[in-house]
Amino acid sequence: MRGPRRGIRRLFHLGLWGPEPDDGVEWEIEHHIEERADELEAEGLSRAAALKEARRQFGDVAAVKRELQAADRRSDQRRRLAIWLETTRQDVRYGTRGIIRNASFSAGLVTTLGLGIGATVAVFAVVDALLLRPLPYADPAALVHVRVQQPGSDFGRPFLPPDVVREWLERDDAFAGMLPHQRRSALFTGGAEPQDVVAHRVAPSFEEVLGVYPVAGRGLVAEDAVPGSEPVALVSEPFWRSVFGGDAATLGRQVVLDGVAHTIVGVMPRGFKFPVYSHTDFWVPLALSGEAAGGNVEVVARVADGAFERAAARANVLAAGLFEGRPRLDSATITLMPLEEQRGGNDDLRRAVWLLFGAVGLILLVAAVNGSNLLLVRSAGRARELGVRRALGASRGRITRQLMTETLGLALLSGAVAVGIAWVSLRGIQGLLPDSLVFWLPHAVAVEKRALAFAFAMSVGAGLFLGLLPALSSTRPADAASRAGLSPYAAHTAARSRLRRGMVVAEVALSVILLTGAGLLLNSFIRLTAVDIGVRTDNLALLQLPLTAQSQPDPALRSSFLPALEERIRAVPGVVAATATGGLPSSVLAFGIALQAEGQPPAGGDPPMLPMAEVSPDFFDVVGARLLAGRPFRPAAGEADDVAIIDEDLARHLWPDGDPLGRRFRISEGDPWLTVVGVVADLQLEERDKRSGDFELLSPFDPTTASGYVTVAFRAASDPARLFPAVRAAVHDLAPDQPIREIVLAEAAYAETIQIPRFLAVLVSALGLFAVVLAAVGLFGVLAYEVAQRNREIGVRMAIGASAGGVRRMVVREGLILAAVGAAIGLVTALALSRFLEGMLFGLEPTDPATLGAVVATMLLTAAVASYIPARRATRIDPAEVMRAE
Amino acid sequence: MGESVEVVRGTLEMLVLKTLSRGEALHGFEVLRWIRDTTEGALVIEEGALYPALHRMERRGWLKAEWGVSEKGRRAKYYRITAAGRAELAREEARWTRYLRAWEQIAVAVRP
């Protein structure tokens, strides 16, 4: 304790007289006793007896010492604190003065660091909301999804028959809680207009298993799920707010869902998201028996004490009994999928998000390097001032502390700027977040507590890192004397200059790495958007409707609804054409397990996915798909149901050399054979990057029997968005209870498939651009400083006949050499790292020479510009002036 | 040496300040010995009370302490009165004098 404390006291110039307080008390009291003993000895006692008597007379020596020591320690601490506060106040004042006096330097540093930290904080907020922050359920790590896995399959499906779940609930001893649930949409009537809402059916164990309770009213209880009980519903906070105006009187009110009046008994908390779904409007009790039971059920379960393996084993024993004798379940097994692993979409997306975090980390590094460079240049500039202060007796520790305070102040200022930048960037990022990434996003992507704490930690960290380096080097004792003015060139040591140049090289290298990533992603994105999807999306809009028995109760009217709707929409002024389809963009993906052309064996290899759509005869005209051969479908009444129109890729796949028209194929064994009546130009109904299959399959659409989600595609003469209200009105005129799921521009609907590439391309490009700017600023700073330092040398060169052009070339060459070295290092590193981008790129390799060439060219060009300004400044040096200054 | 009396509560600090007001820096034992000898043993200050009082007054800024070496060659903590200490002493003396005067008046009034 004594050693280090002494050191600290020395460093901060604290209480330097006398011993430590504890020792002082000891010495003082013992001194008293000896003095008293002297007196007693003089009265004739022996020394030993005298000491003993003195001690006796004193009383409880130890207690007095303890009391004194305690009191002294307290006051010592107070005093130390006071001194510390005073010193800090001085440092802050000194630092503030320094920051203000060097306003341009301060602004440069704050901008650099603020941008670096701001970008990091923004991306942190995304990563945190998507992947890091614990899910907003009680003990979220214990929650799992129960999945049924078929033998030989790689992934389980989350669906179980309701009666299996009922029996399981009765004998469950595998989990600490089971929550069966079923996602259903329902028709909500009684509001301003009929709405297609999500009424999630949940078991009453809902709140206990998730540990989330209503903010108003009560939760669901077991009696609510008993058949025949009064229907009740919990409402989501957003729905409650938007439809019921957030009125507390909503509790007890009735809402009509699928024609049945439900009493609202509670409101779930704001932001609550049921795992793993994007949004829910109502929660209603799930019945597992009786008429109401139907359809497969999903199960979320809570595992006790983190014993996942035991729970899985026990669940499998139970399941084996329950599954026995059931088709398709007989040999299936149960797997438990932790909810935490289902965050942030799929693996690719998670990887993309981490990639982004890595990229922003590089930015922060570049910003930090730039910052420390600025500080190095600055500290060399103020070497004289510090030297004088050293000479006047300021200790090295004291100066270090003052410089640290100044840098820390600048860093905190940068932190504040960073929070503003993060806030602004997040507004931009929110609009770019791919739907699949935020599908189940239980947290808001925003600058909140954790992001603020992160920003604070980052700025303090940056401040300490940046402050320590120049502070230590400018106070190095050996340098101090020379700084004091003995040699004006002493600061410009070779080591210093090497360090600065090294930093610029590092910055350029980091920028090249980021630029390479940005270039590749951008290039890939551009290629993706250039893909011809086979549909002309300009002025095309899609109206999506759920057709159900509830929205169209009368079967006779239902069969005439779609044809009538088509007519109505065509009649809307401004609409050019309309066609009803069974799902656009493709809503069905067929799994071509044994895709085969008649008379040929099924093709080997991975079974392809076939995006499917049902289309009307006028589909090709309305959406602008090109029929290459054959004919469009005939009106449903006159069309066989085993005909298909396939796209040219599928045609080539099935019959590599031959006319497909009139020939037959099937998707899987047991499926009917389909006769090809037409071939359409390459369509991309699902994903542009063709990852999920490039084989589109169209079949005839019968508007009189259609059910489920249907889409009416309509083309307008100009901007279809202006016609949306009229189209809405047409629907409601025709069928007052018919909800509209969505009405969107086809452009936007098809853009969903490129959201992730766009998200990555835009963000990484922004970061790359930022890195280049930072590197350019860094390069500029170093060269400008060197030119200033080499004033004299350049002056002499010019005096003895060097031309202005020659001097310019010299400086620019130096900048370009630094940039070239950095670019080479960056390129090699980028190539080594490029495998991280594999799978995210479409249509180009991570080693794409054009992209790499463009990156290097951009970097070198930027470097040349950044070098030219100091170069021109160098030529303005007046040799005579320099000589006179000597 | 006559019979000794206890130090009246609240007057210890005044006594110490008065002792030190002579100007000389004294260590704790010297303060105690001076008061004892000057009052011919009538006032005996308890050690257990003296040192806390000295430290308290030092914290309040009435005394300034310094480490030194005594005539006997021992390291000792010497106390010296400060300007603030003198001011405090003046206040206390005035208060104490008023108190004594009041006591005198009462004593005279009740004289048997």
Image (cartoon, grey):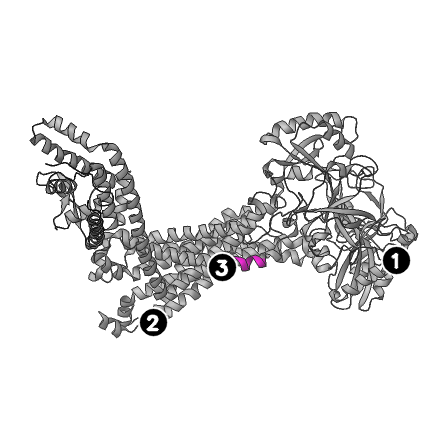
Q: Is residue B83 left or right of residue A668?
A: left
Against A119, is A141 above or below? above
Callout 1, which amino acid? Pro
Of helix, strand and loop, which mostly describes the magenta segment? helix
Q: Mark 2 lies on which chain?
A: A
Which residue is nearer to you in this view: A541 or A266? A266
Specify whether disc 2 shares its chain with disc 1. Answer: yes
Residue bearing the label numbered 2: A875
Which residue is nearer to you in this view: A243 or A223? A223
Mark on residue A485?
none
Q: Is residue B5 left or right of residue A113?
A: left
Q: Which chain carries label 3?
A: A
Mark positioned earlier in the residue sequence (3 or 2): 3
Which residue is nearer to you in this view: A553 or A496? A553
Q: Position of residue A95 (x, y in %)?
A: 34, 59
Q: Position of residue A652 (x, y in %)?
A: 76, 48
* Crowd around label 1: few <14 · some 14–19 · many ≥20 (10 Å): some
Callout 2, which amino acid? Thr
Q: Where is residue A316 in the image (x, y as percent from the top left)?
A: 68, 27
Q: Mark 1 lies on which chain?
A: A
Mark on residue A563?
1
Disc 3 versus disc 1: distance between alpha carbons? Answer: 55 Å
What segment is highlighted magenta in the picture?
A419-428
Mark positioned earlier in the residue sequence (2 or 1): 1
Identify the residue at image location x=90%, y=48%.
A640
Q: Where is residue A633 in the image (x, y as percent from the top left)?
A: 86, 54
Disc 3 versus disc 2: distance between alpha carbons? Answer: 30 Å
Callout 3, which amino acid? Phe
Q: What element carries label 1?
A: helix
Instruction: Specify whether residue A764 is painted magenta.
Output: no
Residue bearing the label numbered 3: A770
